[in-house]
Each structure stands twice: as C-alpha cells, then as structure tokens.
Amino acid sequence: MYKIWWAMIWFLPLFLFADQASAFVVSPARYLITADPNTVQTVQLSVKNDEQESKKFKIFVVGVKQSESGALVFEKDLDVAEAWVRADQPTVVLVSEAQAKINFIISVPKNASPGSHYLGLAVESMADGESGSVLGGRLFSILTLRVAGEVVESVSVDKWSGPMASWRRDWPMSVQLKNNGNIDVSLKSVVDIKYQGKILNTSEWPLGNILLINSVRYLDKTISFSPVWPGRYEVQNKISYGRSGQVVWATYYVWYFPIWSIVSVVLMFLFFIFVYIKLRHRHVQI
Amino acid sequence: MVVRKSFILFLILLGVVSPLTVHCDMVSPDNTTYLIYADAVDAGGILSTGDIYSLEDTLGEAIATSTSGGVYQVLGGYQAMTSSSIAMNISDSSIDLGDLNSGLVKTASTIVSVTTGDQSGYSLSVGSITWGDKILNSVGVDHAVTAGVEEYGFEASGVDSQLVGDWPVVANQLISVSTIPVVDSPTTLIFKASISGASVSGVYTQSVVFQASVNLEL
C-alpha cells in the first residue's frame, strides 16, 4: 500500500502569473507638501509605458507605515489622509512609449490636526481580460503631507540594554526608539563608554532613515572596545533627533570582569580558605 | 576568635554586595514644539513634472527660522519633489511550474529589474497576491521547500536581495533593497512548489503584484 501511494502521481498544474507588463516608469519618486487645513492642492505624477504594447494602469492611494527596521509598508486604511487625496482618474490607458500626467487632488479638511502624513501614490499595471489573474507591477511615489500648525518632536528610548556582566570585549547592545510626536524626525546616535567618569570610547551608531510618527525603531549592535580594568562600565547612548536637535539619552551599566580578574579572585579565595584551615588547625593543636 | 575575625575580614574584602547590581537610566528632556506655516502657493499649485527640480532641503534656512526657548517655526506652504523617477521591468508575463508530483520540487523563475536615480535607492517587495480556487501551503520556517511536503514559496537572488532560502509569497514580503541609485538592478525570483500525497488535485493559479518605491531619506 505504501508503494502504491508513492507511485501515485498528482497532476497539479500550477500557473503563476507574474508581471511582464510592468515595464513602466513613474516620476517624481517623492513629494513633500505643506498645507493649511481647509485648503486644496494638486500634485502631478507622470507615468510612462515602456512596453511594446498598450497597457492599462490603475491609479490609487494607500497609507504608509514603517516596520521596526525602517522598511516601508504600504497598506490601505493606515492613515486618515488617504481620504483627503484622490486621483483625477482611476485608470489610464497608454500605448507603447506613451506618457501621461495624473493629477492627485489633496483636500485637507478644516479640522485636520497639525503633523505629518505619509501616503503612497500608486500606479499599477493591469492585465487585459485574464480571468482570475492580475498582471501586476506597482510603483509608488511617496507623498509626505504636512498639515500646518504646531508640531511636537518627541522621541523616547523605550529600551537600551546589553549584558549585565561580561568577560568579553564585545558587548551586544539593543536600542528601541519610538516617535511619539506628530512629525517625522531624523536620528543620530553617539555611544560613549565611561569608566570612573572618564570617556574611554566614543562611536557613532547608525540608526537608519527618518522615523515616522508612531513608528518604533529596533536595532542591535555589538560594541567592541578594549577595557583593561574590571568594574562597572557606563554605556551611554545619546540620540539627537529632528529639526530641533533635541537629545535623549539612556545609560546602561555593564560589569566587566576580564579573565585575569576572575582567576585572581578565585586564587585569592582559595588562598584565604587555605589560610583559614591552617589557622584553625593550629588553634585546635594549641 | 582570631580565626573568626580573619574570616569575616576576608568576606568583607571579597565583597558581600552583589556585583551584579545593574542600573539603567533613561532621560527624556521636554518635548520641543515648532510651528509649520502654510502660505498660499501660486495659482493652481501644480508643479510641472516636465522640468527638472532639485530636491529642496527641508532643514535649510528657507524653511526654518531661528529658534528661541525650544519653540521652532517652520515656513511651509510649498511643494517639493525630487527629479528622480522609479522604473520596474519584469521579464515574464507568466510562469508555469507544470505538473507537480510528490517526488520533487518544481521551479520556475522570472527577473524583476528596478531603475531609480533617487539617492536613497529603492525597495522591492511583494505587493499583493490573489489565489484562484485552491491554495497551496506556504513554505515553513525552515525556509526550504521540500519534496513530499505541500509547500510553496520563492527564492530571491541578486546584488540587492535581502532573502536567504525559500520564503512565503505573502503581501509586503521584502525582497530587495538598495541604498544607492541603480540602473536595471536585477533580482531573480525562483518560485518553488511541492506536494504531498494528501494534496488536493486540480489546477492552482496565483497572481502576484510586485511593488517598488524609493526609500525614505536619512
């Protein structure tokens, strides 16, 4: 029976339709708009069909968020501003080598709060008449829409940690930041290692691209340097962010015990035990 | 008595206080606020994409005024865009993995190429997928499509590829990243499928949309 099962051949044709009609170009690649509440602005996107045949393109708007590593994620219903932006045409048909300009009308509502919004202006190549299949290549132009008013730059260090104690010279550290403000911020980090109040080592720690609002950035990095003496070392991470250049810092203490210090302590301990036993033996004899 | 005192002295020298006491301080200063002003733009407010515009520095003096007491005023009300573009080309209109059987893993490949002059580079990912009537199981956490097990996934290779092994074909799965401008940077995608003896027979179809964008600036 086992052999019969192995002899059975399941015919399962699998057809995967990938995009060949996505040979197209979108420009510009990014926009930055600042607008008052209760105003209307328009931005324009250019789409060019580089295919040898006529293609139909779908035009739409999605929200943008960041993953913990800083990568962009495009999804519907991520940002309220998706409802403020619409394309003047939902689709466009381009013959080979043709180019079209698509207008995106931005209507900022009267009660819009100040701050940043991130949107993807999408152009997607569509299949013609393929049942059950979508021939899809999709390109985004990233739109940063800032509503005028008072904005707050605020970044918190939610985590700054490493080894509690170590005999190694490589200390794996982790940092987690969060943008609690209502505008995106750039990030810079400098890590100082101090011992008894003196800075022994300073290094820059790249934190990646700008941090969008409500986004969390999580990074691991191993700090390597050459401590000499055992004891408590202070590892301080100073993070400056945004246009205001605000600084937030976090300190973590690492107890460093080089091998020679551990061996010395053990030998000292054994010596004292030996002395104790000797003295006790002499006391008993007396 | 002398011995006991010596022993106690030894313990003090050794340090009875735990050496593993650690302390972490975090300090966040007061938040800083600033104002974004939006002035009226020129009539129509449309920037033509036919001309070349340089990227405007949002941190430059054209926008920010001097600071005082932690309050910042930013002159806004403008539109800025890059002169760069982004392009994508996929080498195949369809991929056919043929007849699957439980004895081996079937594969088929395509190449996705991206071009952009943006200084931040690009990111390529799976945008969306649509299955037909039947669905194959995604590859497991071992990241290897295995013969005799119903699994489906893809492998990516290329200078910008971020993936090692076989990965599920799911929306927003990151494939390739470059942090510099590129011209026709190719990523080869090898789709793989295998079945088990319990797999349901029939025709399986899936549509895949690949998506690309420039990255956020530093």
Image: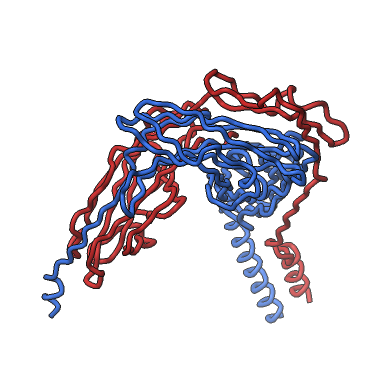
Chain colours: A blue, B red
In the picture, residue A57 is in which quadrant?
A: top left
User: Which residue is at the front of the view, A268 or A179?
Assistant: A179
Q: Compared to B215, does A2 lie above or below?
A: below
> Quick check: can you spot residue B194?
yes
Q: Residue at x 61, y 41 (%)?
A: A85
Q: Residue furthest right?
A: B69
Left or right of A185, for residue B123:
left
Q: Compared to B5, does A155 lie above or below?
A: above
Q: Position of residue A175 (x, y in %)?
A: 63, 50
> Quick check: can you spot residue A196?
no
Q: Position of residue B15 (x, y in %)?
A: 73, 63
Left or right of A45, for residue B204:
left
Q: Residue furthest top?
A: B51
Q: Position of residue B72 (x, y in %)?
A: 81, 33
The C terminus of chain B, quarter of image: top right
Q: Residue at x 74, y 65 (%)?
A: B17
Q: Compared to B119, does B19 lie above or below?
A: below
Left or right of A201, for residue B32:
right
Left or right of A82, for residue B84:
left
Q: Position of residue B203 (x, y in %)?
A: 24, 61
User: Which residue is at the front of the view, A93 or B79?
Assistant: A93
The N terminus of chain B, quarter of image: bottom right
In the picture, residue B185 is in which quadrant?
A: top left
- Total numbered badges shown on the rendered structure: 0
User: Which residue is at the front of the view, B128 or A282?
Assistant: B128
